Image: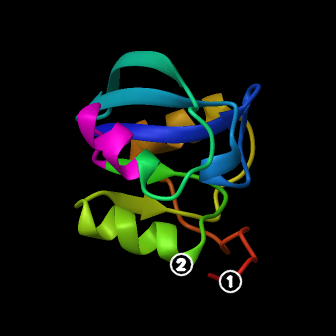
Amino acid sequence: MRYAISADGEEVAPHFGRCEYYALIDVEGCEVTSRERLSSPGHQPGQLPRLLTQHQVNCVVAGGAGPMAQNMFAEAGIEMILGVSGPLDDTIAKIAAGELEAGDDQCVHTE
């Protein structure tokens, strides 16, 4: 399973489309098998679902995303786990352990 975690520095970013980069991680069982950085191309509607599909991402993890983005990811077959915050390494450990839980979506704009 491949995850794209929106990140600013070493923290999970509050908005998937306005982050510095995506931490791409592959998880098999309870083990992280690879980790890389993908620079964010910026926030343009429709661009990120296409980009992350090209990188074979199955799930996006972020603090939040607007309803239009959530619909676009759903149409692309990419799951979203929103309401996540805190250190990137802690989030990766929770994913590997199967303990990551969604929280309240931190994106408050309406589309």
Query: 5 or 70: nearer the eye?
Result: 70
Q: Which residues are magenta?
A: 49-58
Residue type for callout 1: Thr
Q: Is residue 36 above or below residue 50?
A: above
Given contact means CB atoms under 8 Å apart, are the residues at marks 1 and 2 in contact? yes
Q: Which residue is mark 2?
A: 67
Q: Is residue 4 left or right of residue 85?
A: left
Task: Name the residue located 77 percent from the left edge and 25 percent from the top edge.
Answer: 9
- 2 on left or right of 3: left
Marks 1/2: CA distance?
7 Å
Where is residue 72 drawn, in percent x and y? 37, 67
Q: Is residue 84 left or right of residue 59?
A: right
Q: Seen in the image, is 8 located left or right of residue 37?
A: right
Q: Which mark is residue 110?
A: 1
Q: Secondary structure at mark 1?
A: loop
Residue occupying the point 50% across, 75% down: 68
Number of on-image labels: 2
What's the magenta bit mostly, secondary-structure-wise? Answer: helix
- Residue 56 seen by the camera: no
Asked whether 22 or 92 is in front, the reply is 22
* Image quadrant where one finds the C terminus: bottom right
Q: Residues within 10 Å of mark 1 (few under 14, many from 20)?
A: few
